[in-house]
Image (cartoon, coloured by chain):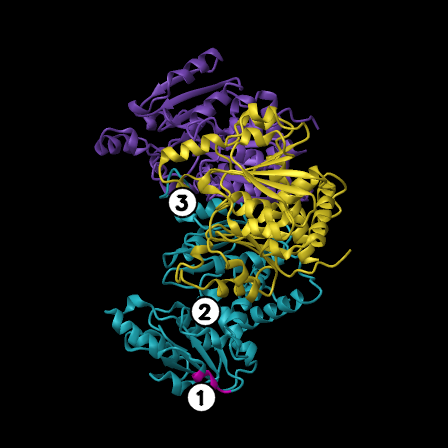
Chain colours: A yellow, B purple, C cyan
Amino acid sequence: MKTFPLNHVVESQQFDRDLLELVFQMADQMKADLFGERKYAKYLEGKIMASLFYESSTRTRFSFESAILRLGGSVITTENAREFSSAAKGESLTDSTKIMAGYADIIVMRHNEAGSASRAAEVSSVPVINAGDGAGQHPTQALLDVYTIIDAFPDVNNIKIAMVGDLRYGRTVRSLSYLLTKYENVEIIFVSPHVCKMEADIKTYLEKNGTPWREEQDLALVAQEVDCIYMTRIQKERFHSIKDYHAAASKYILTPDIVQTMKPNAIIMHPLPRVDEIPKEVDDDPRARYFEQAKNGLYIRMALLYLLLQ
Amino acid sequence: MKTFPLNHVVESQQFDRDLLELVFQMADQMKADLFGERKYAKYLEGKIMASLFYESSTRTRFSFESAILRLGGSVITTENAREFSSAAKGESLTDSTKIMAGYADIIVMRHNEAGSASRAAEVSSVPVINAGDGAGQHPTQALLDVYTIIDAFPDVNNIKIAMVGDLRYGRTVRSLSYLLTKYENVEIIFVSPHVCKMEADIKTYLEKNGTPWREEQDLALVAQEVDCIYMTRIQKERFHSIKDYHAAASKYILTPDIVQTMKPNAIIMHPLPRVDEIPKEVDDDPRARYFEQAKNGLYIRMALLYLLLQ
Amino acid sequence: MKTFPLNHVVESQQFDRDLLELVFQMADQMKADLFGERKYAKYLEGKIMASLFYESSTRTRFSFESAILRLGGSVITTENAREFSSAAKGESLTDSTKIMAGYADIIVMRHNEAGSASRAAEVSSVPVINAGDGAGQHPTQALLDVYTIIDAFPDVNNIKIAMVGDLRYGRTVRSLSYLLTKYENVEIIFVSPHVCKMEADIKTYLEKNGTPWREEQDLALVAQEVDCIYMTRIQKERFHSIKDYHAAASKYILTPDIVQTMKPNAIIMHPLPRVDEIPKEVDDDPRARYFEQAKNGLYIRMALLYLLLQ
């Protein structure tokens, strides 16, 4: 087994094509093992993971904690890392990290400020995994997104992906766009209201890396031609008026009628939580993969924990 | 060992006499094993229980978590399930449940809304145990209550049980009344202030199932004739005035003087927490069983986890 | 191995010189084992520790939880013990403790009221460790502080220790002073603003036990002669005006310039969290031991858990 070259996982930019494939291959093994002979069930026995969440995110936290437990490790956890101490709420992140590194073998950190994970990684004597740092990165989400696409289209042959909704502020679609440039033959279609358009930096990056993209407005039309629709939630606070928001949001709902027109082997993704941009009636459609996508987070995180701690 | 017929535990109505006996027999085994050879100590090794608490209940949560740990399993836990995500507090319970079912082997859920556990169970691919859903059910409490009574009176022969305090709104006494109809030769005496009387639906149910009941006002009088006193807390908010509350509450205190008049082999129960309806002086009386009752929750929950996950 | 004579750890006064040495010797073994053959890795397998924190203290909680996990045990934990129940926030500490003692093999308690741990220990059927009770005690902090000093100066030969900052209200320096009387040849120098001077009770205690002490104002001067500087945070709320606070606090900062003048083998300690009384530039100095000190908490707590549960 090739050794893992990373000490910490703080941003998706750390992953090139080879590394993606290494992680996905390991995630495949983890998934197979969970339903198979469980030979990894005690692989991380004796290892302690510290969940340091400065803001609540039960879904992400449980996904990581399940991952280490499935590998035989154990967990120390807080959802209130902000209140690190009743005495001095103002302790520096780096001090807290150094101390935690004395109690755990790996630190999973969620923070509201971009750059936090990177600052923590700099001073930590044990691996740090970024579980989301504000407007910054959420690399394990990006990895599980790509993994879900690759899982459906293993050879990534001329696939078209529509990213729909709040593209301007969406951490997930930005990271996903970035990682998709590592694959040839992928075309991206951005589908969004005007105020939520994908920003220029990503478009330039795609061009420089030879990934074709275009912008569309009409979800119903785009749905018919793509292999993957990646839905996201449009946030009220992006709009000047509630009326504008409702006008925009109502145009980007993946109704059962639209789903009917999609290719039979296409897939529907969503980082979750959803509100109403995907109605529940769609859940039973075999193309709906968002719950599987969430579950893929478990395999990806098991793979990363394994690789970082091996 | 007879296979357990339930996939989820959401309400006491799921338990008939046979099933009660199966659970209690298993609880007996768990209790004996904890003080004995610990042959179940790794029975659920590798199994993950998710504690999804939408409201705090440290006692109940710890009881469940201790139960799975005593069987070798592990735990992912939150007391703030309401803040499931910083992004979308409004995610549906069913979406959250589906995702959690991907990370855990069994879900224990506490929620403030009646019917939550049942809705969760409908969509969950893993067993769901209701750890209390608002004004609805708290089936494991009902089971441990009956278990505590059966433990003291194994043949349940002509026993009289007084339920005292807030019977109208009390989830525990309502469920307990229901389950006691599964046993012959039990008589129930409801002892409460007028505004907290047991509601008609339960009385009708008792009659239809042949369980005799009557109502009394005087705790001191009733205490002398019963085999079991089940005390509950009278809540201030039931009364129009603080004065009315104090007048009522002071009549339903199980003083040491009253305890003195009880049968020697009678038992005193309370779902806890108590405030002052049972003075601390009573704790040392051998008839006081409320701490043992709380501990019985551990054996009952071990039994259920074992049966649901076997 | 000598049997441990304590059932609970509630205050530093429980430790005489022999007991200190027993704990430190065990802590040494724990430390060696963590970096060695891990023969204690499953020593407490099957044992459950309940973390009952009535106020947040992530550092202390993680230190204890890491300790039991490193020994193979497991954890049930709450940072919101105050909300023990949604129904009755007013449940007595002793009732909560009795119930928890039914679910766990050992209880670690943090509380805001002095005397809480002692009251809990009185009714608990399992060992209770005080993890800080308000203005009262925090005995494991005191132990790890002495352990850190002994680790640097094994024969404790004519060492001088400066305690700096908020000595009047500082729980740690008070307990540390107490424990240092167990060693001969230790001299203590109290360095603090006038309003934060060490109180008379400790000074009297030192005299009665033959431990010399004196008071100084000038940190820069004292720094040159001592073997150990124990820094603490000066709290704003001790001062009448913000201006007085800044005037005082600025005099008790251990600047790199002062550190330069310290003896080469002296050590710098701090119970953490720090604010700015030790600038980050000092962290890389080999004399800075505060992160090691925090980590020593792990070994001390492993030792205590081991000794209490053996």
- For the residue marked with disc 2, what is the amino acid? Pro
What residue lies at 52% left-to-right and 80% top-to-bottom?
Answer: C287
* Residue C273, placed above or below residue A152: below
Residue position for label 2? C271
Foreground residue among B106 and B171? B106
Q: Tag 3 or tag 1, which sits nearer the N-term?
A: 3
Mark 1 is surrounded, within 10 Å at the Cα level, by few (under 14), some (14 to 19) or many (20 or more) other residues, namely some
How far across and down, in percent of the image, does residue C251 sit? 34, 79
Q: Are marks 2 and 1 on the same chain?
A: yes
* Residue C49, placed above or below residue B257: below
Mark 2 is surrounded, within 10 Å at the Cα level, by few (under 14), some (14 to 19) or many (20 or more) other residues, namely some
Residue position for label 3? C83
Q: Are marks 2 and 3 on the same chain?
A: yes
- For the residue marked with disc 3, what is the amino acid? Glu
Foreground residue among A269 and C2? A269
* Magenta span of residues: C257-263
Q: Is residue C262 magenta?
A: yes
Classify mark 3: helix, strand or loop: helix
Q: CA distance from mark 2 to mark 3?
A: 28 Å
Name the side, left or right, on which B245 lies relative to B55: left
How far across and down, in percent of the image, does residue A97 sit? 52, 62
How far across and down, in percent of the image, does residue A176 sit? 59, 46
Residue position for label 1? C225
Q: CA distance from mark 1 to mark 3?
A: 49 Å
- For the residue marked with disc 1, what is the amino acid? Glu
What residue lies at 54% left-to-right and 29% top-to-bottom?
Answer: A254
* Residue B8, placed above or below residue C271: above
